[in-house]
Amino acid sequence: MKILVGAGSCGVAAGANKVIKILKDEINDIPVETTGCIGMCFLEPIVDVYHDDGSKITYVNVTEEIAKEIASSINENKILEKFTISSDDKNFLDKQTRIALRNCGIIEPEKIEDYKQNNGYKAIEKCIKEMNSDLVIEEIKKSGLKGRGGAGFPTWFKWNQAKISKGDKKYIICNADEGDPGAFMDRAVLEGDPHSVLEGMMIGAYAIGADEGVIYVRAEYPLAIKRLKLAIKQAEENGYLGENILGSNFKFNIRIKAGAGAFVCGEETALIASLEGERGMPRLKPPFPASKGFWQKPTNINNVETYANVPWIILSGGEEFSKLGTLDSKGTKVFALTGKIKKGGLVEIPMGDTIRDVIFSIGGGIKEDKKFKAVQMGGPSGGCIPERLLDTTIDYIELSKTGAIMGSGGMVVMDETTCMVDMARFFLNFTCNESCGKCIHCRIGNKRLLEILERIVNGDGREGDIELLEDLSVKIKEGSLCGLGQTAPNPVLTTVKYFRDEYEAHIKEKRCPAKACTALLKYSINDKCIGCSLCARNCPVKAITGKVKEKFNINSELCIKCNKCVTVCKFGAIDVD
């Protein structure tokens, strides 16, 4: 019997460490271990009780008080049904197909023994003992695996180009610089199953002939870095890293580089520049990193999820992986489901499922049962997909037809209270702040886009602004050097395309249909007012006046639109238009 507590970043933030301490203090002779995020972030902290017969009891949303009750029940050999996971929430996992996340939330990530008990390091052993580099690349080719970092480039092709490039030294780099707002797929894998990433890198190194690897990970991921360091140390101690791996001539070492958090360093040439101690700025391609990358040596770069898939593919066969997905997009994809969603967390589904499947079947639909409005896919460089396109299949081609992109796997769900103009402004503000400034189209063009959007949400939109946004966006996409600038206008173009009426309402009527843009709101008191004076007493600027038991009034010139009156009024007497 053992107890496993979810202690990824989401679990820790919800109080998992306190739960662990209580369970360890109050339970006798039963090991209490930690694991990573299983994906059900909305239920953290999660406590799994594994019995000797293989059965498992899952307790969710465990507080310190509940942890004490669980400890008592375990000591008394009882089950607390009222705190266990519901069948509806259990469907969140049952409806997924987990390959990259196969071990997350199941194994103890800080114990190499747990990874090895789940077929860990058998794939690299198979490569060394049974396959040469050509056979490894051929297996990846059969799988149809594409890079999961956003570009969707065939993994086998990148590996092969690095393999055939001449160089006295070659490198493997893992891009763990996850910077999209609302994205946490890579973090969860690094925290929950770091050895799978190491093994994927080893296989890639064996395939291309590299002897050194670097994991470029965000410094904002301290738990991921801690577990990666421990995993590397354990792999070295067990003979999977270093010289003469598994008694062969293959040698490989991995080190970690903590990045400073620049979003543009997610672009591979900017990442390489940062690794070399330079400012993270993209460069023109070709030459591509496969021929001249890190220190001008042949280099292969893939992201965390891509490498995590590789050991499974080698052990199960590329054809098994290719059975999942669509004709163009094979395998599974991990998404971070966030925003106005009931069940936020990590979702891994086969390519070819629809957006509706993910949001409503797995994610449980919209919070408070409000109306779905759009989903932003592909991060700040992606696009907003409206309700009428909910049945779009999730693959690289179909998503691109909507104006969005697969990206690294962010899904930000929006409901009827979201202003699409302000959402475009939010993402443009992010990309403007993260631009490296190297090329004019990105540095200045996106700034001009942002200024127009800010004018519109502040009530100063003008006729012709929509057309100007479209024209500027096209030119920025055509003239920018790297993927950041080339895709930054996507949120603008997609919101204009699908929600043009909202732009027109802001510009022509000085009205925000979603009632989200503060500058365009008007507060007034209706006839439901009984004169209780609660709104007046809570107004921070004394903009509400009147006599007790009579209808009060709001001075629109003094009102700062803080919404305090709405929150304190018990009679629905405040109108917001």
Image: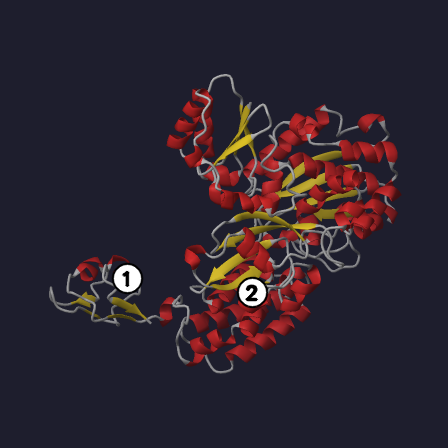
Q: Which color scheme is applied?
A: secondary structure
The one of 344 and 244 positioned closer to us in this rendering: 344
How many labels were placed on the picture? 2
Q: Which type of secondary structure does the marked residue at label 1 adopt?
A: helix
Residue 291 visible in the shown view = no
- Residue visible at 12% across and 68% down? 550
Name the outermost residue toward the bottom.
463
Q: Amino acid at mark 1?
A: Val
Which labelled disc corresponds to residue 566? 1
Q: Percent position (x, y) of residue 105?
A: 58, 36
Quarter holding residue 455: bottom left
Gap in Å between the C-alphas at discs 1 and 2? 30 Å
The one of 348 and 51 positioned closer to us in this rendering: 51
Mark 1 or mark 2: which comes first in sequence? 2
Relative to 398, is 37 above or below? above
Q: Which type of secondary structure does the marked residue at label 2 adopt?
A: strand
Relative to 302, is 353 above or below? below
If the image is split into quadrants, where does the N terminus sit? top right
Which labelled disc corresponds to residue 154? none
Quarter holding residue 376: bottom right
If the image is split into quadrants, where does the C terminus sit? bottom left
Q: Percent position (x, y) of residue 449?
A: 54, 70
- Residue visible at 44% across and 77% down? 505
Q: Is residue 133 left or right of residue 75?
A: right
- Residue visible at 74% across and 39% down? 311
Quarter holding residue 228: top right
Residue on which disc 2 sits: 384
Q: Is residue 424 left or right of residue 565?
A: right
